[in-house]
Image (spheres, rainbow, N blue to C red):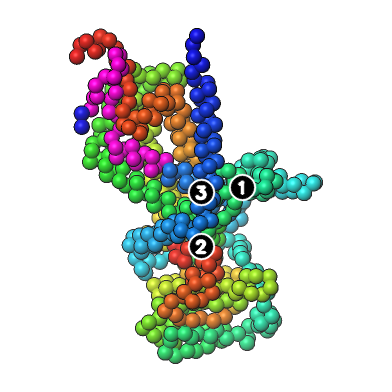
C-alpha cells in the first residue's frame, strides 16, 4: 500500500500556516498594547529624524507650487469650529480683540494683535499639506515669519522648543485644548509662518482662523490651528501628556518628517 | 567551506546552497516584509483612497477608493471603486468582521492588518520601525552579495541563460524542475525574478516611501514630480506592495511544487539535496 503522503501533509501545512498567521497577528496586538514594545518601535523615530537631518540641509525648502496646482477647496480636518465661548466671542467680532501672547523663556514677552502680526515681515508660499492619514492638499498661504516674531521677543539661551497653545478643545466637554511644539530648526526656518491668509483670503475658521502654523517639512498635525498663545520652553515633559503635542500624547511621532 | 558534502545515500547528495548570511537575511526580510505589508494596510485604512497627481484634491476623484455605505437594515456594505466602477466587496474590502464578529466599516479586514483594529499611530510605529529593519537588511544584503560575488556568480544571467529563456518558460508551465547538476543553479526566470525584486522593486518601494516624507521631499526641489507627485508616489508604493505579494505567492508556489522540505531545509541549514545519476557518481 502506498502511504497517503502529500495531501494530508499539504492540508496540515495550510492549517499550520493559517493558525500560525492568526497567532502571529494576535501576538502583534498583544505587543502593541504592552508598554515596552511600542517604545522599542518608537526608536525608529529617532533614527528617521537623524537620517532625515543628515540627508537634507537644515535650511532646505519644501517644494512650492504654482497657482494652478492649488486644490479647489482646502480640506478642513480635525476641528472645523472650536467649541469654546472665548473663541466664539473673538470670531463674532472678526478677531479685532484677538491678541497672540508670546512668553516663556524670552527676554521681552509681548502680545500681538492681528494687525501687528500682519505688519511683521511676511512670506507667501504655495505648498502641499500632507496629512498623517495619507491625503495631500495644496494651498497658498501668507503669514508672519515666526523667525521675525521670535527675534522681537528675544529667546533666552536655554529655550529649545516653541509651544503653540490653541483655542480648540479636543474633548466634547471643552477640555483637552490642542497644542503643538517645534524645535528651533523649524521655528527659524524660512517657510515657517503664522498664516493669516489662505488662497488670498483671510484664513477661514475651518482652516484655523485667525492664525495657524505652517511648518512645511512636517505632517499636517504639526500645523496647529487657532493659535492663542506661544511659549518658549526648555522641555515639554511637564506639559499636558508630556509628548509635545495633542496627537503626540496619543502615540504619534513628535518628529513628523515622514 | 567545502561546497559539496558527502552523499548521504546512493543517488543523492547534499549540496551547500545558501550561505549563513543569505539565510539569515532572507528570514529577516520575510519578517520585515510581512509586518510592513500588514501595518501598511492598517495605515492605508486611515484614508483608503488612491490618487494620481501632486495632491488628493485636484478636482478629480480618486482612482481607487474603498468605502462603506449602509444597507436598509443599517448594516455596512463594503464598496470598492476602481476608476469610477463600483464593486460590492463586503466581507473583504470596505466592511468586514470586527473584533466581536459583527460587520464593521474598515478598508482591509482586521486579520490582514497590524494592529488588528484601526490604529494609525501604532501602525505607523510598526511600519516605520520595520522599514528600517528592511532597509538596513537590504543594504547588508547588497554589500554581501557584491563582496561575496553572489550577485555575479549566482544571480546574473549568463549567455546560456538568455538563450534558454524559452525552454525555461515551458519548463515552468509544465512544473518540470531541473535535476542533477542543473538544480545547483538558479534557472533564468528565477534569476530575472530575483534581480527585478532586489534591484528594481525593493529600491523603488523604498523610494516611494521617501517621496511621501515632507522632509525628504526637500532633498532636491520637485524630485517627486518625476513620479507624478506625492499622491502618485503613494499610489505606486501601494501597487509595488501588491507586486511584492504576487512575487511571494509565486515564489512560495514554486518552492512547494519543486520540493518544499528540501527548499525549506536549504534556507535553514544551507543544504539542498540533489538527485545524482548513477553514471555521474561513477564518473567522479
Residue B107's label in the rendered image is 1
Q: Is residue B224 visible?
A: no
The reply to whether label 1 and label 2 mark residues of one chain is no
Q: Eyeballing the image, is B9 above or below B205?
A: above
Residue B22 in magenta? yes
- How would you rate the neighbour count of disc 1 (Cα within 10 Å): few for under 14, some for 14-19, many for 20 or more? many
Q: Nearer the viewer, residue A217 or A106?
A: A106
- How would you rate the neighbour count of disc 2 (Cα within 10 Å): few for under 14, some for 14-19, many for 20 or more? many
Identify the subunit bearing mark 3. A
Q: Which residue is mark 2?
A: A252
Residue B79 in magenta? no
Instruction: Give the SS element for disc 1.
Output: loop
What percent of the width, then of the height, locates residue A71?
58, 61
Which mark is nearer the camera, 2 or 3? 3
Q: Nearer the viewer, residue B249 or B236?
A: B249
Q: Are marks 1 and 2 in contact (CB under 8 Å)?
A: no
At x 28%, y 31%, the residue is B154
At x 46%, y 77%, the residue is A162
Q: Mark 2 and mark 3: span between their CA atoms?
A: 18 Å
Instruction: Give the SS element for disc 2.
Output: loop
Q: Mark 1 and mark 3: span between their CA atoms?
A: 19 Å
What percent of the width, then of the height, locates residue A81?
66, 72
Magenta stretch?
Answer: B3-30
| Nearest to N terminus: mark 2 or mark 3 | 3
Identify the subunit bearing mark 1. B
- How would you rate the neighbour count of disc 3 (Cα within 10 Å): few for under 14, some for 14-19, many for 20 or more? some
Q: Mark 1 and mark 2: span between their CA atoms?
A: 21 Å
Residue B78 relative to residue B115: left or right: right
Q: Which residue is mark 3?
A: A28
Amino acid at each position: 500500500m502506498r502511504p497517503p503522503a502529500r495531501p494530508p501533509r499539504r492540508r496540515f501545512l495550510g492549517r499550520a500556516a493559517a493558525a500560525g498567521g492568526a497567532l502571529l497577528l494576535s501576538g502583534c496586538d498583544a505587543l502593541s498594547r504592552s508598554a515596552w514594545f511600542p517604545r522599542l518601535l518608537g526608536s525608529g523615530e529617532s533614527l528617521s529624524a537623524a537620517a532625515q537631518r543628515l540627508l537634507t540641509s537644515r535650511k532646505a525648502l519644501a517644494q512650492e507650487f504654482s497657482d494652478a496646482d492649488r486644490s479647489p477647496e482646502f480640506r478642513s480636518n480635525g476641528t472645523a469650529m472650536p467649541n469654546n465661548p472665548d473663541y466664539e466671542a473673538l470670531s463674532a467680532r472678526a478677531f479685532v480683540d484677538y491678541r497672540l501672547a508670546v512668553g516663556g523663556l524670552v527676554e521681552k514677552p509681548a502680545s500681538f494683535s492681528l494687525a501687528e502680526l500682519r505688519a511683521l515681515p511676511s512670506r507667501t508660499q504655495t505648498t502641499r499639506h500632507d496629512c498623517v492619514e495619507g491625503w495631500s492638499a495644496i494651498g497658498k498661504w501668507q503669514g508672519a515669519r515666526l523667525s521675525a516674531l521670535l527675534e522681537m521677543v528675544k529667546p533666552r539661551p536655554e529655550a529649545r522648543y516653541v509651544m503653540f497653545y490653541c483655542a480648540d478643545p479636543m474633548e466634547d466637554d471643552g477640555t483637552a485644548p490642542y497644542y503643538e511644539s517645534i524645535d528651533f530648526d523649524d521655528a527659524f526656518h524660512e517657510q515657517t509662518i503664522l498664516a493669516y491668509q489662505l488662497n488670498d483670503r483671510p484664513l477661514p475658521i475651518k482652516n484655523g482662523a485667525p492664525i495657524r502654523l505652517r511648518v512645511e517639512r512636517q505632517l499636517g498635525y504639526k500645523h496647529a490651528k487657532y493659535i492663542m498663545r506661544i511659549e518658549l520652553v526648555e522641555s515639554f515633559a511637564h506639559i499636558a501628556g508630556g509628548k509635545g503635542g495633542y496627537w503626540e500624547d496619543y502615540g504619534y511621532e513628535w518628529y513628523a518628517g515622514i | 567551506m567545502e561546497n559539496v558534502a558527502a552523499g548521504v545515500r546512493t543517488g543523492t547528495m547534499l549540496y551547500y546552497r545558501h550561505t549563513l548570511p543569505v539565510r539569515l537575511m532572507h528570514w529577516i526580510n520575510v519578517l520585515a516584509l510581512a509586518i510592513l505589508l500588514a501595518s501598511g494596510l492598517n495605515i492605508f485604512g486611515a484614508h483608503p483612497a488612491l490618487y494620481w497627481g501632486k495632491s488628493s484634491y485636484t478636482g478629480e476623484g480618486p482612482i481607487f477608493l474603498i468605502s462603506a455605505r449602509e444597507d436598509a437594515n443599517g448594516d455596512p456594505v463594503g464598496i470598492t471603486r476602481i476608476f469610477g466602477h463600483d464593486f460590492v466587496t463586503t466581507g473583504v474590502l470596505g466592511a468586514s468582521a470586527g473584533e466581536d464578529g459583527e460587520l464593521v466599516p474598515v478598508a482591509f479586514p482586521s486579520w490582514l492588518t497590524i494592529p488588528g483594529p484601526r490604529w494609525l499611530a501604532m501602525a505607523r510605529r510598526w511600519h516605520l520601525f520595520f522599514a528600517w529593519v528592511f532597509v538596513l537588511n537590504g543594504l547588508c544584503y547588497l554589500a554581501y552579495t557584491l563582496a561575496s560575488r553572489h550577485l555575479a556568480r549566482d544571480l546574473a544571467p549568463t549567455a546560456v541563460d538568455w538563450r534558454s529563456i524559452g525552454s525555461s518558460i515551458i519548463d515552468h508551465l509544465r512544473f518540470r524542475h531541473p535535476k542533477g547538476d542543473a538544480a545547483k543553479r538558479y534557472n533564468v526566470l528565477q534569476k530575472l525574478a530575483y534581480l527585478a525584486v532586489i534591484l528594481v522593486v525593493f529600491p523603488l518601494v523604498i523610494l516611494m516611501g521617501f517621496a511621501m516624507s515632507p522632509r525628504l521631499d526637500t532633498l532636491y526641489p520637485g524630485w517627486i514630480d518625476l513620479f507624478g507627485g506625492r499622491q502618485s508616489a503613494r499610489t505606486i508604493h501601494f501597487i509595488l506592495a501588491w507586486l511584492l505579494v504576487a512575487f511571494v505567492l509565486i515564489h512560495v508556489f514554486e518552492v512547494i511544487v519543486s520540493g518544499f522540505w528540501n527548499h525549506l531545509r536549504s534556507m535553514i541549514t544551507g543544504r539542498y539535496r540533489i538527485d545524482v545519476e548513477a553514471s555521474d557518481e561513477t564518473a567522479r
